[in-house]
Amino acid sequence: MPNNGNSFGDDLNPGFAVDRVVYFDVPVGTTPATMVFHDSAFSGGAKVALR
């Protein structure tokens, strides 16, 4: 299948960026401030501000 740039599995090297829309169900009235992204179950993750 051709890669049309919509895959979450794309490699992202340091210094590059992508824009993605990600949907999550959260309780009504919740305003998330940060998310933590991991490249594997064993990574320390990267904390990203949402606002």
Image: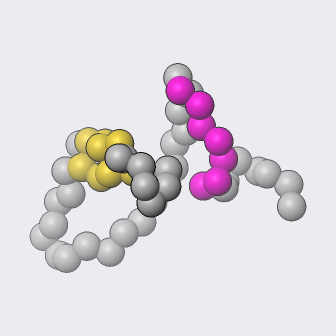
Q: Quadrant of residue 41?
A: bottom left
43 on left or right of 15: left
Instruction: Pick whichever, 24 or 41, lies toward us.
Output: 41
36 on left or right of 13: left
Q: Which span is picked out in magenta?
A: 8-14
Which residue is situated farthest in the front direction here? 42
Is 31 located above or below residue 5 in the figure? below
27 on left or right of 46: left
Q: Is residue 21 visible?
A: no
Residue located 52% across and 23% down the image:
15
Residue located 36% across and 47% down the image:
45
Residue located 13% across and 70% down the image:
29
Tell me the chief SS of the magenta region.
Answer: loop
Q: Quadrant of residue 23?
A: bottom left
The tally of labels here is 0
Q: Is residue 24 visible?
A: yes
Where does the C terminus fall, quadrant-wise?
Answer: top left
Which residue is situated farthest in the top direction here? 15
Instruction: Pick whichever, 37 or 32, lies toward us.
Output: 37
Is 33 located above or below residue 13 in the figure? below
Instruction: Pick whichever, 28 or 45, lies toward us.
Output: 45
The answer to if 4 sits in the magenta stretch is: no
